[in-house]
Amino acid sequence: MLRSIATKNFKKLHDHSFELTSGLNIISGENAQGKTTMTQAIMTALYGVRSVPGASENIPTWGEKDFEVTLEIGAYTIIRSLRNCKVLEQSALMATGHTACNDYIEDHITGADLKTFKLLNWSEQGETSALLTLGATQLQRDVEKLSGVAFIDDIIKLAGIDLRDFQRDVEGFESKGSKKELEGKLETIMTDRTAVMMGQSESETTKKALKAHQTEVKAQLSQMEGNNRLVVKIEKEVIKLQAQVDRHSESLSELAAEEKQLETKLSRLDVIDVVEFQNQKVRLVADRKTYELQQAAVRKKAEMEQLLNGFEELVAVDNELINYVKITEADLQTARDKVSSTENDCDRWVAEVLQLTKTVKSGRCETCGQLIADEAGIIEHEKLLVKAKATLSTLQDKQDVNVKALKSSEERLRDAKEAKEQNFGSWAVKAEFWHDSLDKANEMLSRPLIAEGYLENMQDRLDAEALQIREVDNVNDRLDLLGRKIQMAGKLLSANSVSLEEAKTGCPTSYSDTEVADLKADIQEITDDISNIVTHIHNLTIELATVTELCKQTSEALAAEVEHRETMNEIQLLTELIDYLRNSRVTFLSSIWSQILGHASGFLAQATDGKITGLSKSEKYGFMFCEDGQFAPVTSASGAQRGFIGVAARIGLSQALRVSCPVLVLDEPTESMSEANALRLSGALLSHGQIIVITHRMSDSYTASNVIEL
């Protein structure tokens, strides 16, 4: 339910607020007092400026740039202006921005888009009975949309698509026999296939047995031939091993003599402490690095002191260039602000001049659309036009001066940036780096200095000790090598001796050529048997493939026959479903129209004291009303009768299709009625929820729950 509406600078409603109640709310007043404007404010709050005729910039009161409308509906508060919109629920922000608020209002508050809301909840001036003349197809389409019958249409459409798919699948199907015939044929083929597979399995078993016997005989032949080859090899190995034993004995004697000579040489050499030698090498490397750093610090100190001489003047020049660019940038921003401000003023006064010019030419106020009643009003608007042109001319002159100042500021900034780019040297950053380098050099030179002669003497002593250490290491390495050679020679001598004895005592038994030839003949006979069984298995494999392919073809024919019968059943079920849904759709729409016409008929009987008792809808004549027991087309009704019937039709649609919020706005529904008829209509509206009626009749307010006078 709408609870209140407040406006600021909305057309004629500068600063107004109105309270609304349940039941009948009457908005009364003379023409051009803002009655319709108030309902437009309600529509603007709900659906934005798109719901109001004309350009959005003409909505704010003359001379204002924006408006604000605050609407309280149920637990919600909607605050909308030309630039923004907010929706609150008990002070909690639910949405902000025009698009987000429009979506939230349609989903949670009104439950309908703008077109549906206007159809069910809104009747503008002169359109109370326009619903009765709405095209039958268009009205039927709107009712179908709002009643939800489109869901049934979607199901019918999807079922039709499935039906066409199934019908396409069965086109061109050729049966290969009945299901029973195909199952019998498949059973026979499966029996033949099983017999072939059993024969194939038996042949494979025979083949495996022959191959196993062949493997055993080949292993026996291989053992015989291997023994003969091993006897020859062992005889050659014995000769070779005896020569190796003699050679290793001589080598062992020579190595022992060389080891004794090296031990004598090692006893004569001086031994150097290797750990102390390494420590001295490390200290020498550290001292040499420190010496190089100290020499570099001396050079760096002299270089930095030379660079830092006179840098303060260069830093001052850099600072002057930076400050000059900042000053010119600030001047340019000030000039831009002046140009922008004057440009906005010029645009506003240009719009003012154009609007006043149209008003003077047409004699109709461009703000409210009302005709100017007398010549004095035209003269007043002409004076305003002259003043507006003078103000615009002054602002345009001021704008020319500001534009020239802006160009001058841009040139000064460009010159300042060019001067900075050419002369700026970043001397402050460079000086900071030079000071850091000088401090590091002084820190290095504060440590004890290392003499160059000390480094040379230490290096010579370490070189001599390194030669002595290398010579000792070489002798020790040669002794270790000789020890390993002596140990290896001993092992080889022992191993060769053992191998020689084993070769002499481990020679196997040899076989004659006749024994080997008989065994080869047995292997050839087994090979011929295996070849014959492989040929038999191959023939069985070909036969099995043929039977398997025939089995596959028969199975596919059987599956296709079963699928075809199932598809035919699906086609029959879908056809029955589509017929049922189409009949249900007609029945459902008939019940919706019965509810709409029932609500409308009840209202008509109440509002006309039983003179009009019913409202019906004919395919040929459209809406028809019943008066004194006789039905007649609405086109033959009087103006007052059309007013009653038009309101009744809107109440019927609103109550039967409850998809929108429970409020009905009627603009001048009694303008074509007598006082008595208008009073009866107003009285009948009291019992049909919240209704807002715009009227200029004082008598319409007699039965109202709430009266708002403008």
Image (spheres, grey):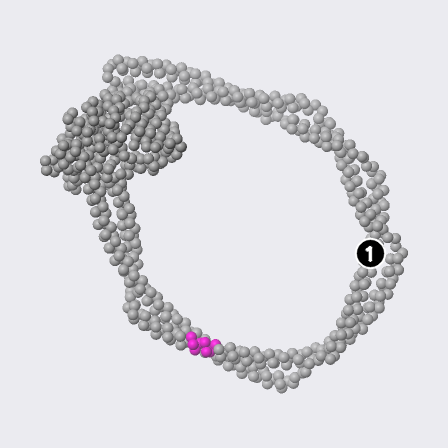
Q: Which residue is rendered at x = 82% and y = 50% of the image? A: 274
Q: Which of 702 and 274 is in front in this view?
A: 702
Quadrant placement of the C terminus: top left
- Left or right for 393, reference 138: right
Residue 383 locus on image (x, y percent): 31, 13
Q: Find the residue positioned furthest to the bottom.
A: 514
Residue 246 is one of the magenta-drawn residues: no
Relative height, residue 618 to residue 482 (above, below):
above
Q: Is residue 147 above or below residue 343?
A: below
Residue 308 location (% of width, % of height)? 71, 26
Visible residue check, residue 168: no
Q: Is residue 199 magenta?
A: yes
In-front residue for pair 414/246: 246
Tell me what residue is drawn at x 41 percent, y 17 percent. Answer: 396
Quarter of the image with the N terminus is top left
Question: What are the residue bounds of the magenta stretch?
Answer: 197-204
Query: Which residue is located at x 56 percent, y 78 percent?
Result: 215
Q: Which residue lies furthest to the right in this view?
A: 268
Q: Where is residue 355 in the image (x, y as percent from the top left)?
A: 32, 21
* Tag 1 secondary structure: helix
- Residue at label 1? 474
- Please indicate, yes or no, whether residue 508 appears anywhere in the rendered image: yes
Residue 622: x %, y % from top left: 17, 39
The residue that appears at 44% across and 22% down in the rendered structure is 340
Q: Residues within 10 Å of mark 1 (few under 14, many from 20)?
A: few
* Left or right of residue 163: residue 286: right
Total numbered circles? 1
Classify residue 437 as left or right of residue 103. Answer: right
Identify the amino acid type marked 1: Asn
Front in this rendered view, residue 319 or 27: 27
